[in-house]
Structure formats: C-alpha cells, structure tokens
Image (cartoon, rainbow, N blue to C red):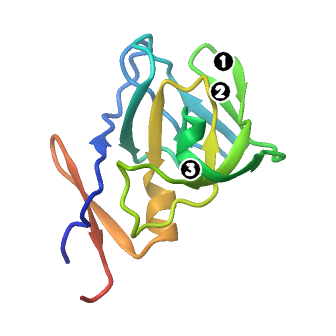
C-alpha cells in the first residue's frame, strides 16, 4: 500500500472553538454542523473524519454541477441553517484525479473545504491513516 500521489489535504483537528476550526458532520436529521471561521476563504482541503460528505466554498471546484434539490442543509455553530445550493463532482488541482469525488456539496458561505473521510473511503478503494499532524490516503488496489 502506498500513498496516492497529488493528494494535498490537511488534517482537520476535531476541536470545538467556534472562531478557529470548522467542524462538519451529518446527523440522522440530514443536517451538517460546522463552526464558522472569520479567517476568510481558505482554498486548502481539510480531511474531516466527522464529515460524511465533501463540502466546498468554490463553485469552480465542482464540475457537472446541478442545483441541489435534496433535504440536507448546513447548520452553523450558532444554530442558523445554510442551504446546500449545488451538488456535483469535485475537480480541484489539489485533489488526486485517481479518486472519485461525486455527490459533493457547494455552499458559498462555508469557510473551509472539507473532505468527508467516510465518503472518501466509501466511494474509493482507499483507507486513511491519521498521525499527530498529518494523514495519508492509501490505495487498496494492487499495483
């Protein structure tokens, strides 16, 4: 097993400090929770083991984009709801073209781009190793 090339992601530390770290996770009620950041848009990608889906703040990173007609929504730290406006496939230079990133969500108000680890491992034959300050996405397919 070797790390996949060209996969540039950051480890999302699971802390609940509203102005420092974005958090995301889907619940049984079909809502996503995250704590907003005041730091402006960050175009990096953050691996989030609590997020079950990928979410981006940049419409240019979604191809085959269509208006989202589902029932899921984003819920921010103060309890207010943000709509998921579009769904599509991620197409980012920072992400490996060897992986599938289908059914990804777009919301212009989310502060950080989040890779949902459960969606990543469900849609691709990979596993993720977490370390103190990094993580590796490894391919399960034989070479």
Q: What crowding class fits label 3: few (fewer than 14 Cα within 10 Å), some (14-19), or many (20 or more)? A: many
Give the image location of residue 141, x and y in percent: 32, 84
Residue topped by disc 1: 79
Dot 3 or dot 2: first in sequence order is 3
Q: Quadrant of the C terminus?
A: bottom left
Q: At 28% across and 41% down in the image, what residue appears?
A: 11
> Are discs 1 and 2 less than 8 Å apart at CB?
yes
Q: Where 114 sits versus 18, above or below?
A: below
Q: Is mark 2 on a helix, strand or loop?
A: strand
Q: What crowding class fits label 2: few (fewer than 14 Cα within 10 Å), some (14-19), or many (20 or more)? A: some
Q: Distance between the residues labelled 1 and 2?
A: 6 Å
Residue topped by disc 2: 75
Q: Quadrant of the N terminus?
A: bottom left
Q: Is mark 1 on a helix, strand or loop?
A: loop
Looking at the rendering, which quadrant does residue 128 occupy? bottom left
Looking at the rendering, which quadrant does residue 31 occupy? top right
């Amino acid at each position: 097993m070797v790390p996949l090339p060209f996969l540039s992601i950051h480890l999302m530390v699971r802390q609940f400090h509203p102005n420092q770290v974005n958090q995301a996770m889907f619940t049984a009620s079909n809502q996503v929770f995250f704590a907003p950041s005041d730091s402006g848009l960050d175009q990096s990608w953050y691996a989030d083991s609590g997020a079950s889906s990928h979410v981006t703040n940049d419409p240019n990173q979604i191809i085959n984009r269509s208006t989202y007609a589902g029932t899921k929504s984003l819920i921010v730290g103060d309890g207010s709801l943000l709509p998921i406006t579009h769904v599509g496939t991620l197409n980012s230079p920072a992400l490996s073209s060897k992986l599938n990133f289908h059914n990804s969500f777009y919301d212009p108000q989310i502060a950080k781009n989040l890779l949902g680890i459960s969606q990543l491992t469900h849609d691709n034959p990979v596993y993720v190793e977490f370390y103190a300050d990094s993580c590796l996405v490894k391919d399960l397919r034989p070479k």
